[in-house]
Image (cartoon, helix red, strand yellow):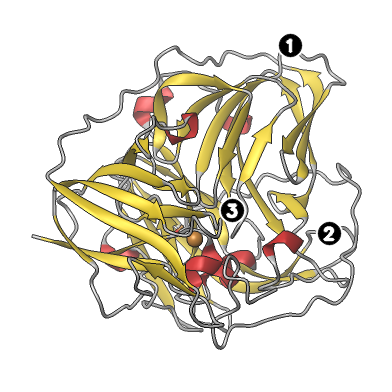
Amino acid sequence: DGAHPGHPPPPRGAAVTASTGQAPSVAPFSVRMPVPPVARPVASRPDIDVYRIPIQRAEVDILPGFATSALTFAGHFVGPTIRARTGRRTYVTFANDADVPTNIHLHGGHVPPASDGHPMDLIDPGKWRHHDYPNRQRGATLWYHAHPHHVEAEHVYRGMHGFYLIEDPAEAELGLPGGEYDVPILVRDAEFDAKGQLVLWGHPANRTTILANGKPQPYFQVAARKYRFRFLNGANERTFTLSLGGTVMTQIASDGGLLPAPVPRTEFAFSPGERVEMVVDFSDYPPGTQLVLTDAAAGPVVRFDVTRKAADSSRVPTTLRALPALGSATVTRDVVLSFDLTSGNPTGLVNDKPFDPNRVDFQIKRGATEIWNVTNGDGNYGFPHNFHLHLVQFRVLDRGGRPPLPGDAGLKDTVAVPPGETVRVQATFATDYLGRYMYHCHFLEHSSVGMMAQMEIVP
Ligand code: C2O
Ligand code: CU
């Protein structure tokens, strides 16, 4: 199994656990979906919030009756949610109280290189690191996760993922659902052994337990009113296609924040790392109604139980927020994602080379506007990939000459690149930070074996 290149074997030195029989089975909708706790600043001044978040091994409660060993932020399988604000700096000290070197990347964040979590820039056990997140960007649903080279797949799979929500004063006046009606939901899969432990580097097809905020197919009680759900695909390898039994959901945002206008959708697909924000209006459903959010392949993800009536003064205006002007590109580049299948040990490649931290793959002039043709070179084999760019948000121009898909709308930092397809994206690199940043496939077992490259922003 492990030698199949679409799901490569673990890199040398990786922790591997063998499957030890049937996973405990949990009846769907038997546990409640929690909302990840909100992190509390250890200090706040008018222009800055300071957080300290420990990285720790912990026993977490995922499957009823089992304690699962996880690698966590502050002991939570989905880490504490950091709520930041546009224009107000966040300073996070990540303290490594675990026994392995690791690091943290703010996915979707526009941050200085020293705070970006370069895969070779690790926090050793017993050490800590300050991360400077200026939040000079639009409101958006970001997430923070581990990014140490070769073991990002393992560390994220073990639980090093959490939300980072940037609230934007420009968004506040729109009147979208807020407070307890603004709910982040991390969707992912996992494989468990008979003792309720995570199986690492197993075949992704065996990751049949679907988790919403770290619980297997939970239920979530809602009031008969509008909710803002911030969905994150936190899986290593799985693309989800979610629907609510035909109920119309209103998409208001994607990776990098609000869309220009709301888009009604009955189904949406997202690949690892992508975010989709949906407003769901339960006001037509009397208390007692149950609506199941279902993945087209894996089945139920979470059941929304309408349990009460509630007042609702929120709204979804017909215009949300204009996108920044696209600008005209002066540079075009090609990026090909593929596997090297010539040896028994598949290696991930970007433009025919595995990741080399000592090599700069693209030099990019700060402020430049560029078009990248991102191709999945594994069309013959049918391996899916996606593409994630650090530092900036991009726009999807087209897919193989055809118009973008509904899910490509808005500001994106991660986009699906199906087998054989070329996705054209355009980005404007900001002028404020120079240095090295990653771009890679966000199927984390792929990036872990080399499907990653780096750019250097230069004067
Ligand atoms: Cu979410 Cu370079 O990753
Ligand atoms: Cu890939």
Q: Nearer the viewer, mark 3 or mark 1?
A: 3
In terms of sequence position, does the residue under pointer 1 or pointer 2 come before the other? 2
Residue at image coords 72%, 46%: 34
Quarter holding the N terminus is bottom right
Image quadrant of residue 435? bottom left
Task: Judge whether 438 appears above or below 448 on screen.
Answer: above
Assess disc 1: are there few (<14), some (14-19) or many (≥20) residues with their C-alpha within 10 Å of its C-alpha. Answer: few
Q: Are marks 2 and 3 in contact (CB under 8 Å)?
A: no
Estimate the x, y position of residue 87 in percent, counting from the top left. Answer: 29, 41
Q: Is residue 335 visible?
A: yes
Type of residue at label 2? Leu
In terms of sequence position, does the residue under pointer 3 or pointer 1 come before the other? 3
Apparent side of residue 121 relative to residue 56 in the rendered image (left or right): left
Residue at image coords 73%, 80%: 17
Estimate the x, y position of residue 442 in percent, counting from the top left. Answer: 48, 58
Q: Are marks 3 and 1 in contact (CB under 8 Å)?
A: no
Estimate the x, y position of residue 272 in percent, counting from the top left. Answer: 54, 52
Query: The residue tagged with tag 3: helix, strand or loop?
Result: loop
Q: CA distance from mark 1 to mark 2?
A: 33 Å
Q: CA distance from mark 2 to mark 3?
A: 18 Å
Q: Which residue is mark 1?
A: 284
Query: The residue tagged with tag 2: helix, strand or loop?
Result: loop
Type of residue at label 3? Gly
Task: Judge whether 183 appears above or below 26 on screen.
Answer: above
Assess disc 2: are there few (<14), some (14-19) or many (≥20) residues with their C-alpha within 10 Å of its C-alpha. Answer: many
Q: Are marks 1 and 2 in contact (CB under 8 Å)?
A: no
The label shown at residue 234 is: 3
Quarter holding the C terminus is bottom left
Type of residue at label 1? Asp
Assess disc 3: are there few (<14), some (14-19) or many (≥20) residues with their C-alpha within 10 Å of its C-alpha. Answer: many
Q: Which residue is mark 2?
A: 63
Q: CA distance from mark 3 to mark 1?
A: 31 Å
